[in-house]
Amino acid sequence: MFRMLQFNFEQRGRKTIQRETARFLSAIFLLAACFFVRPVGASAAATASASPAKRHVVHRRVGSKKSAHLRVASYPRARAGVLLTRTSRRRHRVFFNPWTEPTFADSTIGDSIEGDDLVVRKAAADALGRYNGTVVVSDPETGRILSIVNQKLALKGAFQPCSTVKVIVSFAALRESIVNADTRVKLSRRYSLDMTTALARSVNSYFARLGEELGFERVEAYSKLFGLGEKAGLDIPGEEPGYLATEPPKTGVGMMTSFGDGIRLTPLELTSIVTAVANGGTMYYLQYPKNQNDAQHFVPRVRRELDIARYIPAIRPGMMGAVEYGTARRAVFDQTDPVLGKTGTCTDTAQPGVHLGWFGSYNEVGKNRVVVVVLLTGGRGVAGPIAAQVAGSVYRNLAAQNYFGPEPAATPTKLVSMQNCCRQ
């Protein structure tokens, strides 16, 4: 009997010790959680004051008087790694913000517009609106820059080109006779497509295959031919060149030719490339007049002649198809005034907290043809289709001012590309 009582006592003692140990460990865990993840409140406000970005805390009562307050923290410009929290009486959620750039900002601050075409300037600034980015508009027949919105970003910003590099890859593959306009590249057992559809829909696997066929040496050679890694402008104060890798990126040549790995592209470099495509192969030095007198006495300067005129008819349907039915549909296709272009969307590999949206474009109708290049930087909501939407607004704003003038009596762009126009 005594041994039975002793055994029961020991059993109860062990259970008590286990309960106390569990309570102690729970308390330690809660203290650690409070220390490392603090809810929005006075302590979070102290953290917010250390950053130049503003934090707004909105308190809203939900339900009856007994319901808990719902606190929502809004971070217009939060640093990567900042924990965004929502708290209530019963629930505590933690959100991670990966972006270092804001999606919206005043992109006109600090610009000098003495040499701008003011009609173009207003059209571009209105189109960009609240987005954090830059718009470059140039004359493809002279290389004159008509306006730059957010000059600091356009001159000093070099980013991954994303899918805009596919324009260069297309010319390289055509010239090296790897494919022609009608060649259907087999990507899987039941899936193949031609260059027109691949450009319009920006099919990464197609251009990765072309990159593997070309090899790094030829990709590098054609990239240099189109001016990558060089300054695109002539005597433009503050301009910095992009970057071109001298050896294959670790991710492979396929990623280089589909996403632009190993390349840093500036908005002016893309403007120069699209200008050469728009005028048939003449690569001008981009020049940005400092004042209206310079604009009136503008003298074009040729940088080099590219032997691409015979390949442009094979690429034009894909760039037109991007706006008609592909990735640039938000630019809004118009058969009477078609726009041709190429989008690009990716997260910058050198700056993982920056998401990019590119669009390089030009029109072919009217007395004043222009090249419009848009680069958007930020986080959520930034993409190539949004950049295309901004560019489309630039063209429509200019058309509303009758900037393009009357349409010529006959023009080859009246033969509008259709999705199946170039298939066998």
Image (tube, rainbow, N blue to C red):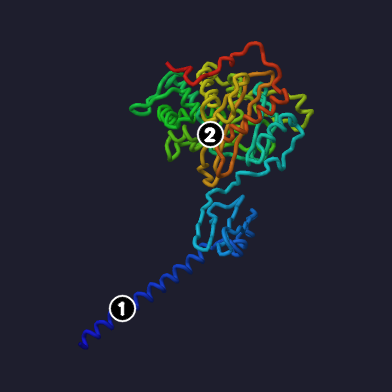
Dot 1: element: helix
Q: Quadrant of the N terminus?
A: bottom left
Where does residue 255 sit, x and y in percent of width and height?
Answer: 45, 35
Q: Is residue 100 left or right of residue 109?
A: left
| Residue 423 horizontal/vertical position (percent) | 44, 18
Q: Which class describes the residues within 10 Å of circle 1: few (<14), some (14-19), or many (20+)?
A: few
**In this orientation, which residue lies closer to the viewer: 144 or 120?**
120
Q: Residues within 10 Å of mark 2 (few under 14, many from 20)?
A: many
In the orientation shown, which residue stands out farthest toward the bottom? 2
Establish if 417 lies above or below 354.
above
| Residue at 69 percent of width and 37 percent of height | 237
Does 412 sit above or below residue 165? above
Along the viewing direction, whichever of 103 and 50 lies nearer the viewer: 103
Name the residue rendered at 61%, 28% in the picture: 272
Q: Is the residue 71 above or below the residue 205 in the image? A: below
The image's mark for residue 344 is 2
Describe residue 234's horizontal placement relative to residue 65 as left or right.
right
Q: CA distance from mark 1 to mark 2?
A: 65 Å
Q: Which disc is residue 14 wearing?
A: 1
In the picture, which quadrant includes the C terminus? Answer: top left
The amino acid sitting under disc 2 is Gly
